[in-house]
Image: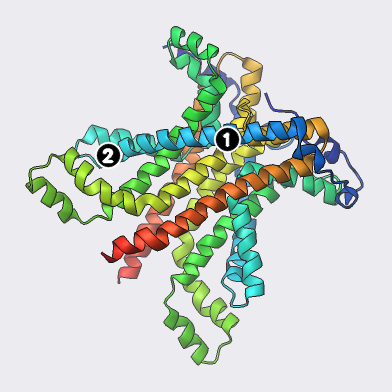
Amino acid sequence: MSILSNFQVIADNFTYFMIGRYPHGPLGGVGLTIYLAVTSCILSFFGGLLLGLLSVSRHRWISLPSMAFINIIRGMPLLMVIFWMYFLLPAIFGTFPEVRTVIMALTFFTSAYMSQIVRAGIEGIPKGQMEAAISTGLKRWQAMLYIILPQGLRNMIPSFVNQFVSLIKDTSLAFIVGVSELTHVGTQINNRTMAYPTEIFIFIAVVYFILCFAFTSLSRWLEGRLAWRKAI
Amino acid sequence: MCPPHPLHHTRNSKRGLDVLSYHFDWSIILSGKYFDWLVSGVKVTLQLSAAGIVLSFLLGLIVAIMRMSAFKPFRWLACIFLEFTRNTPLLVQIFFWYFGSYKLLPEAVNDWLLTQNFEFAAGLIALTIYTSAFIAEDIRSGVLSIPKEQMEAARSAGFSYLRSMQYIILPQAIRITVPPLVNQFLNLAKNSSLTMTIGVMELTYQARQVESYTFKGFEAFTAATLVYLALSFIITFLMHQYNERILKIHMAA
């Protein structure tokens, strides 16, 4: 097959695929993909926690606006969120680097989804826990922080890992604003070499697959373990 | 290949807080040429979503049945398909079908495709395949939630495996699967925005087009966002009604 022999183009550009021009220039390729995913994952974990807690608040003036925010973000395509950030952030802060723009967009977007996981995790804890905590004299927020969340968070772990997999896939949209992560690097090399689009995009898909599949498997394993621990 | 930076003028601002001095002009996008562009974008988005919904449901159904079949090669094939489609980004799949598929197809097919609306077709194929994987998993978990005895009873009544699926299991499973399926269709409608990268003139594409012609980015993107939100909220509302009425009635019965 001619296709197999053409994979030479991957070998020739392998370092560029993996780290971009890194030692001599900005990080790119797989390295930047992972950087984007990990940074926005950490930020959106806290964003999601905050939004999730706000949305289960008993005070309507807190829970309603946060629910509205969550639903608006979830009703939009990620691409739209990226475009909004892409021209809102520079308009507010002056110049704003593309990489940070994308991280902000991914954080906002993923926080909204993470908040639903947090919400489900909190609501999955039996009501008696909260009542028991309050009757021991804890305040509501203390009970939430020390009793409900620690139990809920454990059940949320598999969903968080799944969300991280989505996040890895979503980083590919950074392509649209010219951030040179894996997909962008792939199109660059495709434009330069012209002749091997099939090989290049199969290779990129395989790289994403390896990254995502590792975490999908991890989430399945965790799910099994947590279910097992619960059963005891 | 990479589209020109949208909103170039705003990115070049060094002062910050330009947003306060921004002069809104809604009249541009509320009538005339740019309005027509946006409307045609909405049409393409709806076409893409509608076609994608039908096709991905059918493909998802086939994959789900293969995934649950007793015949091992089918199960493996379905598993490989599911894992690979769900663990690669949609954008990469779109690029693969748009740029890379020609090497895998016969020449005659390629020639014919070039006379057609190839962007739309490639986008539709990618969206269909990507969404069908998620739909297949939803259908499968719906089927798994139907008690095993139903299948056993159907088989002992003389139905073949496929017929018991068709008449006994799937009708019950689909009813439970409707809410997650609707969710996937919403995702599909939102994901259709990614096809702008290969030049499908859907809503997001047109919004950017309007922006680059008029420099009225806020207005164009607000309009597009509102359309997406309206779509989501209407469908979410309908699903809520379905949950409240139909699902509750059937669950109680």
Percent across and percent down for residue B207 are: 71, 36
Q: Residue at x 50, y 8 (%)?
A: B111
Element on which disc 1 rests? helix
Q: Position of residue B78 (x, y in %)?
A: 32, 36
Front residue (pair A14, B67): B67
The residue that label 1 is drawn on is B45
Above-or-below relation of B54 to B122: below
B190 over A39 or under it: above or below: above
Tag 2: amino acid: Ile
Residue at 22 percent of width and 39 percent of height? B69
Q: In this rendering, would A229 be left or right of A53?
A: left
Asked if one can make out residue A178 in the rendered structure from this viewpoint, the answer is no
Q: From this viewpoint, which residue is outermost toward the front?
A: B31
Label 2 sits on residue: B65
Instruction: Tell me, yes or no, if residue B171 can be seen here.
Output: yes
- Taking B224 as reference, is B242 left or right? left
